Image (cartoon, rainbow, N blue to C red):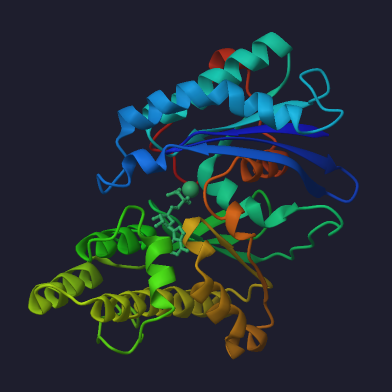
Amino acid sequence: MIILGIETSCDETSAAVVSVNETSQEILLLSNVTASSLTLHAKTGGIIPEIAAREQIKYILPVIQEALRSTPGVDAQTIDAIAVTYGPGLIGSLLVGVETARTLSYLWNKPLIPVNHLYGHIYANWLTTNGQGPKTIDFPALALVVSGGHTDLVLMKSHKKLEVVGSTRDDAAGEAFDKTGRLLGLAYPAGSVIARLSEKGNPKAYQLPRPMHNSGDFDFSFSGLKTAVLREVKSLGKPTDKQITDLCASIQQAIVDILVKKTLDAAKKYNTKSILLGGGVAANKKLRDTLSEKSELSAVNCQLFVPEAEYCTDNAAMIAAAAYFQKKEIPWQEFTADPELYYE
Ligand code: KG4
Ligand code: ZN
């Protein structure tokens, strides 16, 4: 089965082709092409929705054409389904992908599969690239979805049974990186910049809070961390480069500590066999390394799955993968975007 995936929920315009072996359930990635308008937003401290959507209108057809062109033997006739993100996200951006997918479904007479972006981040873990063989992920699995808009712990008893067991009460983990980065004068999105600067910094230099660390549930809160960083920045006046790298390392350490503790506690409580990371923050090396090193991981007998960094941030390959397992076709006439979508 060949699936064309389309993702346009935020600033990215992405198209991908995957080939599914329906016997082994291997989701083999054949092509993934992504254009981003991020450089246009870097100075403004956040995405400007209207600019993102206008850029996406320009990119969408060339990106789809390139995804098909770079996959030998695959064209409009040979694909079996079109999968597209229909939420959550920015409405103007979502509509670019949704309306393109509806039109192609009608023109090419192909089934249309709506995909929840959050499920996409989870299903990035099922993607394989050449030669790896199918991914065997045992249930129950616990997914930590950490992106610019979400921080969720999702218990998966099967592909059809998902339950949110924890989520953020205020800022998302990615937002915590982005907002504290902004206080330090770093460009948006600051997550990867903080990660890079942290390599030279001392994670113990500043005593930052770990909100809700011992709350006994699996919810998160990051707004207190932002306030604490604001206080530090104000007291420093104009921070030196050394103070900035130390603050970056301390911020990253605080966020990673909270995410790792809650994830391992939830894995223990629900006796999960697998832990899956997903979302832009899952690209963070410190988070990936800390979780894989933690001795508790072997104590709870869990296997850790982490997508390659480029499939943690927004991409269409993960949307095509999620479409195969979720398999919910919809007639193009009845399909629309849902910017407020959460887990069904
Ligand atoms: O999943 P994503 O690409 O888009 C959303 O669905 O939101 O996630 C974007 C978020 C941003 O907040 C960005 O700062 C963060 O992921 N991010 C990172 C890293 N790379 C991206 N955060 C920490 N470390 C990174 N290496
Ligand atoms: Zn995302």
* Picture residue at 57% right of the left edge, 12% below the top: 333
59 over 32 or under it: above or below: above
Where residue 193 sits in the image (x, y, percent)? 39, 63
* Picture residue at 61% right of the left edge, 79% below the top: 292
User: Is residue 125 toward the left or the right of residue 43 in the image?
Assistant: right
User: Is residue 223 toward the left or the right of residue 158 in the image?
Assistant: left
Where residue 72 sits in the image (x, y, percent)? 84, 31
* Picture residue at 48% right of the left edge, 56% below the top: 280
Quadrant position of residue 306: bottom right
Q: Nearer the viewer, residue 322 or 62?
A: 62
71 over 169 or under it: above or below: above
Q: Residue furthest right?
A: 23
240 over 343 or under it: above or below: below
User: Is residue 284 toward the left or the right of residue 243 in the image?
Assistant: right
Please say whether residue 203 is visible from this viewpoint. yes
Q: In which quadrant of the rendered image does the N terminus lie? A: top right
Q: Nearer the viewer, residue 316 or 236?
A: 236
* Picture residue at 44% right of the left edge, 73% below the top: 259
Where residue 69 sits in the image (x, y, percent)? 75, 27
47 over 139 or under it: above or below: above
Q: Residue furthest front?
A: 241
Where residue 86 sits in the image (x, y, percent)? 51, 32
